[in-house]
Structures are given as C-alpha cells and as structure tokens.
Image (cartoon, rainbow, N blue to C red):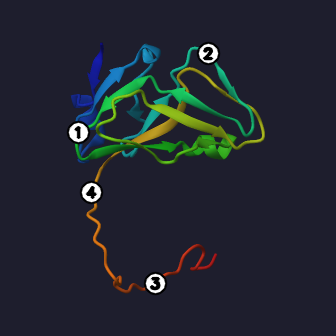
Amino acid sequence: MIHRVLDSPAFARTIGTMDSIRVQVKIEPEGEGLDLPRYQTAHAAGMDLPAAIDEDVVLEPGARGLVSTGISIALPPGYEAQIRPRSGLAVKHGITLLNSPGTIDADYRGVIRLALINHGKSPFTVRRGDRLAQMVVAPVCRAELTVESELPPSGRGEGGFGHTGR
C-alpha cells in the first residue's frame, strides 16, 4: 500500500503564505502511474483530479458516467474536500459534474469518483490522465440549529429567486 503526503518543501513553497494542512493520499491500483493531484498555479484554490481509467470512455450528449480518480484520501477532522467542475471543460465541451460541488467528508476513505455528464452537443472522449475536476480542501463549520418563533429582520427579507432583477 503506497501513501504519499502533500507536505513537501516544494509544496510549501508553491503555496507561499497560504495556510496548508497535511492530507494523506492512497494510490489505488487504477491510479498507479498517474501524477498526484496538484495545484496548476501558485494561487490556485483547487487541485486537478485525473481520470484513472484503463480504456477511453465516450460520453454521448446527455450521457453520464462515473470515473475513478485513482486516489483515496484521509482529511484531518474539521476539513472537507469539495469536488468541483473544471470551467474549461464546461465551457468548451459541456462536461460538468452531476453533484456539484460534491463533498468528501473527513471520515470517508473510499476511492474518489467523479459523476460526469455531457451537456454538450458532441460526444466527449475521456482518456487516462485527463484532468476532469478539481478538489478544494476547506475547513468545515458545524452548525447548531435553534428553533425560533421569529427570525431577525434583514435587508433582503424573504426575496428569493430573481428578486434583485437581471
């Protein structure tokens, strides 16, 4: 079983003064040989996640599919990993995630898989190593709900969908 940790001096230099946490990564069999998820720029919020597949997958227009990233992670308590679409794939090809953002909880140890959908007009081919989504690690705040007979007023009030105009 291989474990790699995103806490190297090079990683610390890449993020500069931003906070960092240690995230343990297990490479699953289908992920062997792929690069670890990584930040593509010094100030990127998300790490790109690759397709860990053995054969190309063609998503026809309107079709959806589940694609492995080839990794499992162990987040520290108090953190989540948000799985988000990559904007370039969405704009250029209509490829996005069905449950966006998806949440990886700190106690989940299974393989991270991506629920893709093709909203485009053409078939889209997913190839091994394609960067399909991004993972943003973020702190979690637990809410304590209290039942009240009235809520405090706000400037918005009950205005909902489209209430501020176009």
**Residue closer to the observer: 157 or 45:** 157
**137 relative to 63 in the view: left or right:** left
Instruction: Report the amino acid beneath label 4.
Output: Arg
Local crowd size for mark 2, using a 10 Å CA cut-off: few (<14), some (14–19), many (≥20): few
Secondary structure under badge 2?
loop
Q: Is residue 126 above or below residue 41?
A: above
Query: Nearer the N terminus, badge 2 or badge 4?
Result: 2
Instruction: Report the amino acid beneath label 2.
Output: Glu
**8 relative to 48 in the view: left or right:** left
Query: Nearer the N terminus, badge 2 or badge 1?
Result: 2
Which residue is label 2 attached to? 55
Which residue is label 3 attached to? 157
Secondary structure under badge 1?
loop
- What label sits on residue 76 in the rendered view? 1
Local crowd size for mark 4, using a 10 Å CA cut-off: few (<14), some (14–19), many (≥20): few
Q: CA–CA distance between discs 2 and 1? A: 34 Å
Query: For residue 75, what is the image quadrant?
Result: top left
Query: What residue appears at the point 48 percent right and 31 percent down from the top-left corner?
Result: 113
Q: Is residue 43 above or below residue 166?
A: above
Mark 4 vs mark 1, foreground winner is 4
**39 relative to 15 in the view: left or right:** right
Query: What residue appears at the point 73 percent right and 40 percent down from the top-left corner?
Result: 62
Residue 1 x, y percent position in the rendering: 30, 13
